[in-house]
Image: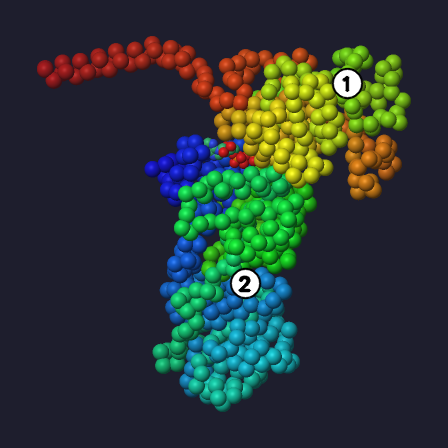
Amino acid sequence: MTAFEEFGVLPELGKATDELDWTLPTDVQAEAIPLILGGGDVLMAAETGSGKTGAFCLPILQIVWETIRDLQSGKPSKKGGSAAGAVAPWTMSFFDRNNALAVTPDGLRCQSREFKEWHGCRATTGVYGKAKFYYEATVTDEGLCRVGWSTQMANLDLGTCRYGFGFGGTGKKSNNRQFDDYGEAFGKADVVGCMLDLQRLEVSFTKNGAALGVAFKIPENLRNDTFYPAVVLKNAEMLFNFGKTDFKYPPGNGYVAVCQAGPDHSAPNPLASPAANTAASKPAPNAPQAIIIEPSRELAEQTYNQIEKLKRYVTDPDVRPLLLIGGVRLEEQKAELQKGIHIVVGTPGRLEELINSGLVQLTHCRFFVLDEADALLKQGYTDLIDRLHKQIPKITSDGCRLQMIVCSATLHAFEVKKMAERLMHFPTWVDLKGEDAVPETVHHVVCMVDPKIDTSWQQLRQSIRTDGVHDHDNIHPTNLSPETLSQAVKLLKGEYCIRAIDQHKMDRAIIFCRTKLDCDNLEQYLRLRGGQRYSCVCLHGDRKPQERKQNLESFKRQQVKFLICTDVAARGLDITGLPFMINITLPDDKCNYVHRIGRVGRAERMGLAISLVSTVPEKVWYHGEWCKTRGRNCNNTNLTDVRGCCIWYNELNLLGEVEEHLNITIQQVDKSLEVPVNDFDGKVVYGQKNLNKGTGYVDHVEQLVPTVRKLTDLELQSQSLFLKRLKV
Ligand SMILES: Nc1ncnc2c1ncn2[C@@H]1O[C@H](COP(=O)(O)OP(=O)(O)OP(=O)(O)O)[C@@H](O)[C@H]1O
């Protein structure tokens, strides 16, 4: 049995984890997997590289596989099952309903989050014979609803055929598409009493106990039919009481609760059994069970690949994931969707586009995952997330509650907590440190770049092309103005980058720059300084999707040594055994420091992160909304306060913010960029597992030797004393 199986994971998934060399679940996996398998909403806050992706992919794959297996065999799914089959006899039906309408496991609450169309449902039992029947329906959420009675012949859109008699929230009654004013409007928290008098063949309603009069005369030809409580909803929710608990407004006047109709006056709904209607709960091919949102196409691709690897042995039924990212032809994605998919991994824009156009249906979605959730919120996707969440039924069409999983290494943000309060259902925090933290495997240092002390920038023979913010400034080595010093920092950082590479004999590193232009300039400079020695590629938003993909691949395959990128690659990218990273400039957002340096020191391997920090303010580009070209060929070097496109960047302040956020002081190294070995652990090899983990172990044993000897002597003494006593 693999270690993962002990946490309740399927043997087929356990086999795949074994092949990936995941011998033991990481801490976050050990906590989160059972919680997710148990049906809970989870917020996963754990360090970079701690295996969060596996922590949600494994249980999702498992539950999705179980669900499709059950659907294919015609069995109701586990969680909806008991309610669907066994709860007798008075509930709303799990089967006699439209797909987008969900029924809670107790069968007493219906919800539809579809806001364009009506979706209906009928009860599991109906009434007939000369008697008077009553039930109550309470509006529990805003939206449109119509409630009443219908026969088995009626369609589910209550009131639109001859066999359904409904009363709607807008104050209209309807039968056979004839909508007439009746009673008064009702809405959230109102209780509608539904009365059926089969002696007089009349349907009437009450609102909060007040009688609204006879709504319909039932035609004589329906006298012997069975009538079922029925509802139809548009983005609304209603709660039903068939008389099992006290009515809020008991009807009197000879009406009895439907659930007390007795065997002579009630009959089961033939369409309410699983066998009768498996098709109704069968998802359409384009209705996935899980939706995973990632902030960048690279991350979406990575998570998709991880799912592919983990699902290798999960067959019969096959679980089909699909990647939905921009830059891929829509036609291709449409074709895949029609073939049938179960898990969708995508970026927010493309996902919403496909959902809005109906190409992805949310009717059977039971997992809503936000990976790097704080990034999604910071990128402005709060409304999009809220919109999607609103559209997903909270109870799936097979009676399962929607599970939401949210993760990041920097989840301790106000916006995340607000979102969790708004959207999640009693979530459990899996929070191993209680604050944003850097893994112990990441050795991170800063090197101050001080152009006043290090004046080598004045004599550089070859230098990096800078970003041009000082093109209109009067800069000259003899004039140490802020502008000159700022330009000097840019030149020095190019040199320090090369020095860091040489000093640590780096043959693999990820290098972060602040802007796309900085990336391009550094790429050009590294190539200039030595083709193969500093071979590099860029990854940023101005590069075409295909080029981005190729560049990342060639870096992963070690065909090039350096990957130069903006924060587009700060999060989540998992490059096995990456030993080094360099921050040419600290990120604007302190959280991204954690993510950037977390590209190294993953999966227990050691990594070194070096950040270059300017001691003087540096003038940099900042293209706001007012910048017509959004930075492309922009040469407005004025400051933003005069609607220009530049700001003064204060890295010392940023460093202070990062240190305060992480509650640490980051070690400083001098301009030689040598990292003192003793301060960390001189024996480690960056990029490899720390085999010396527990250094001092030898010392430790040596220290313990005298104590252990003493203990052995004492043990001997006590045993001989005991033996002596026995002899006495
Ligand atoms: N149980 C395990 N044992 C060994 N390696 C693992 C285990 N789980 C995951 N890994 C590996 O650890 C690496 C990091 O995992 P993952 O990308 O899921 O980290 P993460 O927590 O999502 O990091 P980030 O916050 O940077 O996105 C991956 O290469 C993955 O294959």
Left or right, 625 with respect to 405, comes to right
Q: Residue at x 63, y 76 (%)?
A: 171
Which x, y percent locates residue 265? 39, 81
Where is residue 497, by image quadrant?
top right
**Separation (CA) of disc 2 from disc 1:** 62 Å
Q: For residue 213, which numbered disc appears in the image?
A: none
Q: Nearer the viewer, mark 2 or mark 1?
A: 1
Estimate how packed mark 2 is, as few (under 14), some (14 to 19) or many (20 or more) residues with alpha carbons within 10 Å: many
Q: Amino acid at mark 1?
A: Ser
Q: Residue at x 59, y 54 (%)?
A: 334
Front residue of this view, candidates 696 and 9: 9
Asked if ligand 1 lies within 8 A of label 2, the reply is no
Q: Residue at x 53, y 82 (%)?
A: 203
Which x, y percent locates residue 216? 56, 84
Q: Which residue is mark 2?
A: 100
Q: Which residue is mark 1?
A: 463
Q: Amino acid at mark 2?
A: Ala
Front residue of this view, candidates 592 and 519: 519
Query: Is residue 47 shown to the viewer in this render?
Result: no
In the rendered image, the residue lying farthest to the left is 728
Image height check: is 670 above or below 292? above
Which x, y percent locates residue 264? 36, 81
Left or right, 219 with respect to 62, comes to right
Front residue of this view, candidates 100 and 183: 100
Estimate how packed mark 1 is, as few (under 14), some (14 to 19) or many (20 or more) residues with alpha carbons within 10 Å: some
Q: Residue at x 48, y 86 (%)?
A: 222
